[in-house]
Structure formats: C-alpha cells, structure tokens
Amino acid sequence: MKTIAIVSTAGGTGRTTLTAALAVLLARRGRQVVALDFDPQNMLGAQLGIDGLAATGVSQALLDAQTAWHGYTWRNADGVLFVPYGAVSAAQSAQCDARLGAAPRWLADALAELDLPRDGVVLIDTARYPSQQAEHALRCADLALCVTPPEPAACATLIARLAALRGACAHLRIVVNRLNPARDMQRDVLAMLGAALDDNLPLAQRVHVDAAMPESFARGTWLFDDAPHSQASHDLQGLANWLDAWLTEAAAPLDRPDGAS
Ligand SMILES: Nc1ncnc2c1ncn2[C@@H]1O[C@H](COP(=O)(O)OP(=O)(O)OP(=O)(O)O)[C@@H](O)[C@H]1O
Ligand SMILES: [Mg+2]
C-alpha cells in the first residue's frame, strides 16, 4: 500500500478536485483506493458523491480516542472507499489540531490499521500547508503532489515553503492546475517557479483550466465522462496514468543481488 498526500500552500488550488478525480481514475484502473479527507473544509465527500457535507468522519476519532476512524467509511459508485473529515465547530477544529499536535504519529497509526493490498493506494486531501493535517499527511506519504495554480501569490507561497515541503516528504511532485497558456502572466509565473526548482523536482504535471470542471461537480458527474476529449480530461487521465505507473513501480519487489526477486 502506498500513501499519496495532496497538499498546497494556497487555498482553492484544486486539491480536493484532484484528490477525488484521481481516486476515481485509479479505481477505474483496477486499484483498491482509499480517499481520506484530512481537511476541516470537509468537501471531499461531496466530490465523491455524498449529497451535502458529511456530518461525521475522521474528526470524531480525533475528538474521542475511543472512536475508530474507519467507522465512518463510505464507498462511492466507482468503488472508492472514502472517509470524510466530518463537520466541526471552530472549537472542535482547534481540539482536533491540538490532538494532532500532541500525537505526531496519529495518522500513521490510523493508516497502519488499513488492510490494503501491496498495490493499493491511500490518497489524502489535506488542509492548506502549513497545518497539522498537512504535516501528518506528508509524514506518512510515499509521494506528495503539491498543487498550485500558475498565479503569482500561490507560486510565491510555494517557493517560500519549498525547502520545508521537501524536508517533510522525500518524493514531491508539483502539479500546476488551472493552466491557461493564453495568459502571458502565467508563462512568467511558471518561469519563476521553474527557476526555483531543479532536476530532482521538475514541473512534471499540468492540468489545464476548464470552466466545465466546477459544472461537472455541480451536476454530480465527472469532467472526464462528460467531456472525455477535453484538454483537462486528457490531463487528468495523463496524471492518473503517471500515478498508476509510479504505483506499479513502487510496489514491485526489489531485485536481489543474486538475481532472484
Ligand atoms: N482545472 C480546473 N479548471 C477549472 N476549475 C477548476 C480546476 N480545478 C479546480 N477547479 C475549481 O476550483 C475550485 C477550487 O477547487 P478545490 O475545491 O478542489 O480546491 P482546494 O484546493 O481543495 O480548495 P480549499 O483550499 O478550499 O480546500 C472549485 O470550484 C473547482 O471546481
Ligand atoms: Mg479542498
């Protein structure tokens, strides 16, 4: 089982959208997928098919040590097993954060209870970095997807946090979301971001802007079903293919020096 954290240093970058879309696309490629909402915004469940916001979820287990987090699991139409964060008040949210701050292994221990096969995957939607939720997810992650729009403020916050993010997770990939190549400003911002990266951290993945993306969400459908030939659908499929290949490679047994595997 591999764990992938979806993080960002700005709000509204597309973390939840990408987590839900990738969970479904990986499930359609035959993988067992668990999607965990680790953001008090509590929006992942709505993306994955719950009508409205889930009242309960992983936050209940944070608030009450006697409660098991997997008691709040749902399964969507594509077979994705998911756990919402649950609705929390400001005071409860602070309590959850305090619990996570006091127990740095809380999420690692929770994920260790999962019984997923070697090639299964957990995708974690996180609260904006820095946050207790994002730090826990990064600590557990075999791979972190760092989502940013090609906008000046978002990229400036990402560059400022890049060293900390790389320290928190050895395998980091930047995903540029809502790309609009017609805008010169975005090209300049991407050049600025590219200059802050190096060979070990290329700007590997891009997802184009598509006004139909929020419309599909509002209809309860997927852009890649509604408009499979659109650029953004193509990008999402490409990102899912890349992740699928990464997961296959990561699950492969290491070659032993004697040639056996
Ligand atoms: N490639 C895209 N093209 C057009 N709209 C997009 C794209 N990706 C995401 N969006 C839209 O951007 C908005 C924000 O996306 P989303 O909620 O996934 O971001 P987030 O990073 O999870 O935000 P938050 O910080 O609030 O948790 C949504 O309306 C979503 O439909
Ligand atoms: Mg979100």
Image: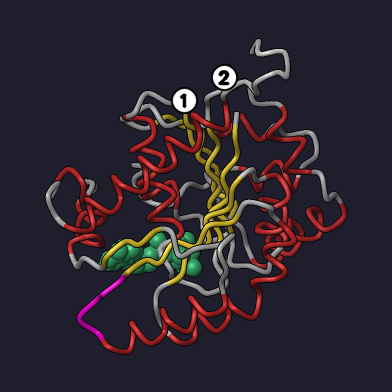
| Image position of 221 with respect to 128: above or below | above
Within 8 Å of ligand 2, the CB of disc 1?
Answer: no
Within 8 Å of ligand 2, the CB of disc 2?
Answer: no
The residue tagged 1 is: 32
- Residue at 21 percent across and 65 percent down: it is 210
> How far from the left and from the top, in percent, is residue 186?
34, 83
> How far from the left and from the top, in percent, is residue 261?
64, 13
Contact between marks 1 and 2 (CB within 8 A): the answer is yes
Q: Secondary structure at mark 2?
A: loop
Tell me the kind of residue under disc 2: Pro
Tell me the kind of residue under disc 1: Gln
Q: Which mark is residue 130?
A: none
Mark 1: few, some, or many residues within 10 Å (few <14, many ≥20)?
many
Q: Secondary structure at mark 1?
A: loop
Left of 87 or right of it: where is 101?
Answer: right
- Residue at 72 percent across and 13 percent down: it is 258
Q: Earlier in the sequence, mark 1 or mark 2?
A: 1
Left of 191 or right of it: where is 58?
Answer: right
Instruction: Indicate the quadrant of ligand 1 in the picture.
Output: bottom left
| Image position of 70 with respect to 188: above or below | above
> How far from the left and from the top, in percent, is residue 142?
64, 43
Which secondary structure dominates the residues rendered in magenta?
loop
CA gap between label 1 and label 2 equals: 8 Å
The residue tagged 2 is: 117
- Residue at 19 percent across and 52 percent down: it is 219
Mark 2: few, some, or many residues within 10 Å (few <14, many ≥20)?
few
Furthest residue in direction top, as rendered: 260
> How far from the left and from the top, in percent, is residue 103?
85, 49
Start-end of magenta stretch: 179-183
